[in-house]
Image (cartoon, rainbow, N blue to C red):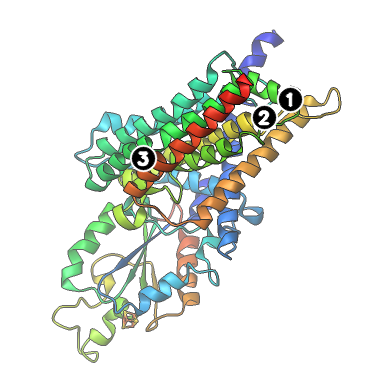
Amino acid sequence: MWSAILPILQTIVFPGFLFLIAVSFLYEWLDRKIYAWMQFRAGPVLAGPVGILQPLADFVKLMGKEDITPAYADRRIFGAVPIMMVALIFTFWAVVPVTGSAGLVSFRGDVVFALVSMTFFCMLVFLGGFSSADRFSLLGAERAVLQLLGFEIPLMLSLTGVCIHTGSLSLSGIVSWQAENGWTLLGPQAIGFIIFLVAAQAELERIPFDIPEAEQEIVAGWLTEYSGRKLALIRLAKDMELVFVSGLAVALFLGGPVGPSPAGLEWLVYPAYFLIKLALVVAILAFIRGLFARARIDQMVSFGLRYLVPISLAQVAATILWRLA
Amino acid sequence: MGIIDWAFRKSPWILHFNTGSCNGCDIEIFATLTPKYDVERLGALLKGSPRHADILVVSGPVTRQASGRILRIYEQMPDPKKVVAVGTCCISGGVFSNGGKGPCYNVYPGLDSLVPVDAYVPGCPPKPEAILDGISKVAKKAGVGCK
Ligand code: SF4
């Protein structure tokens, strides 16, 4: 009986859907607070203690607002995109290790599986912008796909270095390799980590790569026509994607949730390690967001292809030589 | 007070529209976003798209040329929505009201002759504190129950 209920509870409560939603609200708040702190502002303070309920307030408010579908939009795709985005991240969250070296599901090649999610997300962005039948949305959608060209190859190459280094194509293999070898991955793969963070920033459409929704140029980019419930779901999906990508970075470069712990307390200590490391990655991403100004789309693509690709190729070559030696 | 009303009060997103202001009011509105005043404390974000916004903040005299656009932007916003008129020009026509004898030939006698206004922030230009006060008062009124 218990063994039948446990997987369902794991999927729905912890470390599945509800945990993911709670964590993504928490880290959106953290991101906004750090961003505000870097600009000498206070950030949200009134919703709950130190404003911690602000993302929840935003979500509930958007849920309660009128939901407008433009007259010329492709209704079915326009309405399906937000739901599909949330479903996509829920699905891919299952491979991220939270409570141990393996996620809810773990199989050989789940690193590639996790990478595919980013391309899928970008395709959904394109569909959402394309089906809105609005010139700003269309421009934003176009830019999102162009941006994908710029950051996808360096992202994959940065993960290739890790996979060759550890000799494993599964997240659980990479996490347990790091646990066995004393968490020494970040030293030799530091360049890969930096490239992963830069590419993640582009994937998450945050400053300096928020080109697909550049507010001063194209209103709100591909999001322009979304309102009410659909916008709430899209914002939730974007927050969850932030947690998902940071969780990947934690598992791949920072050793995942596994660490020294008193015997028998792993179920409590490992998620705590995970949340602390996640906060670290989110803080780095928030720092990048606060420090830079937006790049142009051509600058972004040429930066990706001209600098990030050769650097990550060199990293992969060095890793291969190290493996052979 | 339900959770939805609470959320509406804690998250007023702003859209700023300039109907022909001299930029005095605009500078003061943007001052509310700066570190000293920081409207994000109230949970407010400045949004670019009318579809995302809850509060329309209008500055400047409503000229005939801008009147069509302001109506369109107002109609593009999802319900429930609020409007704040910032500056004397926006409230009554101000210096363009021909010495109180009625507005100039190209200016409407105030924003409320076009769209319903929820808060008036007088001044030429009003202080950022006053604008913050207007926004927070409108946010307090917000909620599904009181459209
Ligand atoms: S109220 Fe004063 S500052 Fe504001 S737009 Fe009119 S003239 Fe300019």
Q: Amino acid at mark 1?
A: Ala
Residue A256: mark: 2
SS label for mark 2: loop
Residue drawn at x 23%, y 37% as measured from the top left: A73
Observer-nearest of A40 and B97: A40
The x, y position of residue A47, in whole percent, is 59, 54
Observer-nearest of A103 and A161: A161
SS label for mark 3: helix
Q: Quadrant of the C terminus of chain A?
A: top right
Q: Amino acid at mark 3?
A: Gln
Q: CA distance from mark 2 to mark 3?
A: 29 Å
Sequence-wise first label, 2 or 3: 3
Residue drawn at x 42%, y 31% as measured from the top left: A153
How many marks on residues? 3
Residue A179: mark: 1
Inspect this view and state whether residue A10 appears: no
* Residue closest to the far left: B105
* Residue closest to the far top: A1
